[in-house]
Amino acid sequence: MTEEIRKIRVTNSVNAEIQVPPSKSYTNRALIAAALADGTSIIHHPSRSDDSIFLIEALRNFGITINDHGDKLEITGSNGILAAPKDEIFVGNAGTTLRFLSSFACLAEGETILTGDEQMNKRPINDLVDALKSNGIKCSCQNGFPPVKIQGGNFIGGRINVDASISSQFVSSILLSSPYAKRTVTLHVNGKLSSMPYVDMTLHVMRSFGAIIDTIEMKTFNVDNRQRYIGHDFKIEPDASSATYFLGAAAISKGRVIITNLTSESLQGDIQFLSILSDMGCTVIKHPDSIEIHGGKLHGIEVDMNEMPDCVPTLAVVAAFAKGATTIKNIAHVRHKETDRLDALSKELTKIGARVELNKDELVIHPQPLHGAVIETYNDHRIAMSFAVAGLQVEGIQIINPMCVTKSFPNFWDEFQKLEG
């Protein structure tokens, strides 16, 4: 069977109105809180990404009743009383799903086994497993990677130390299940916490479901175990990360894009991508219920992207169309995503003609004349969507395995067609 390839059609300048899908980051956090809550929750406009579908299926295996009403999910909460699934849980390459369930499973009587596809089972989980083990939970992984085995029913609480330099999801995982520990949890982050806005998102969801959390300098989180989640209605925001590809398309084509269902007031860290494009020479217009961007003469910048790791591929591609070099710093954690994204970006940008310097935790992109190429996506949705943007201005860009975008953006190609020539 030959691998599917999507040829991108070149356009002079984009001019489109785009709708982005609901945030999978918010959906997955709300699903965990709703599953643990006392009472029924309604999640409005949930993500239909692969990652969220895997999580819904997994929660059903833990005995959670989830009724799907199309534009909303009705979840009957367990009040923290869970039974371990009979069979092992398979999550594909859904990082948040496997990591969030690792702590969630600590509350379920019996043994839970969590596993993923070949890529997921190469993504490190050791620091989370070590943190749970230090709290007296019997759990193990294979040389630091999934599958993960958890013997649940004994989440003691108290002080827990976690190293979150590889992923903030380790912090979010423990936080989300902490209201159900036997004692108040004091979660202390050792070293550097990467992707801080994602932890803010976790705290926002937890508090909206009624949890009480004290934060001390975003290093220590006290979660009160006497105040548990209460079922309620939660509306999912449109996904800011998904908007970046369309904003980037306007930037490189001196075109215009309106994201009709996202506002600059979004709580997601990736909304800050607007100010990066503004710094590079674009004009951003903020409307009450939408965002408009006009591309301009792009120039290279130096930028710390530690808090916006999912925007790094989009920015790297946009940078190849700027005048002068762009340095993207403090992004070592981007190596531990669906693939080693720094390595993938370096290879594929070089393939289309850019000159790239790759260091341990930074990328420097030197624009050169660009040309077409067949882009390897490494089954990574963000590599596929970012290089599709390049194809709007560079003849001959072809994307291998284009449907890997369903991981976060199931209808990406339908929206993307609005940009193509």
Image (cartoon, helix red, strand yellow):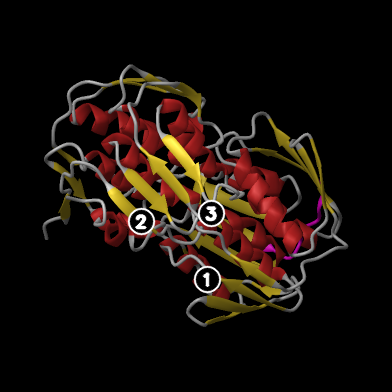
Q: In what element is the residue under mark 2?
A: strand
Residue 379, horizontal then vertical, whole percent: 31, 50
Q: Residue at (17%, 36%) from the top-left corner?
A: 394
Left or right: 143, with 359 as reference point: right
Amino acid type for the residue under numbered disc 3: Thr
Q: Which element type, helix, strand or loop, lies under badge 3? A: helix
Rendered location of residue 125, percent (x, y): 55, 45
- Camera sees residue 404: yes
Numbered range of the magenta stretch: 151-159
Q: Earlier in the sequence, mark 1 or mark 2?
A: 2
Tag 2: amino acid: Glu
Left or right: where 17 falls relative to 347: right
Residue to which mark 1 is pinned: 56
Q: Is residue 386 above or below residue 296?
A: below
State the quadrant of the N terminus: bottom left
Residue labelled with disc 2: 17
Closer to the eye: label 1 or 2? 2
Give the Cα distance between marks 1 and 2. 31 Å
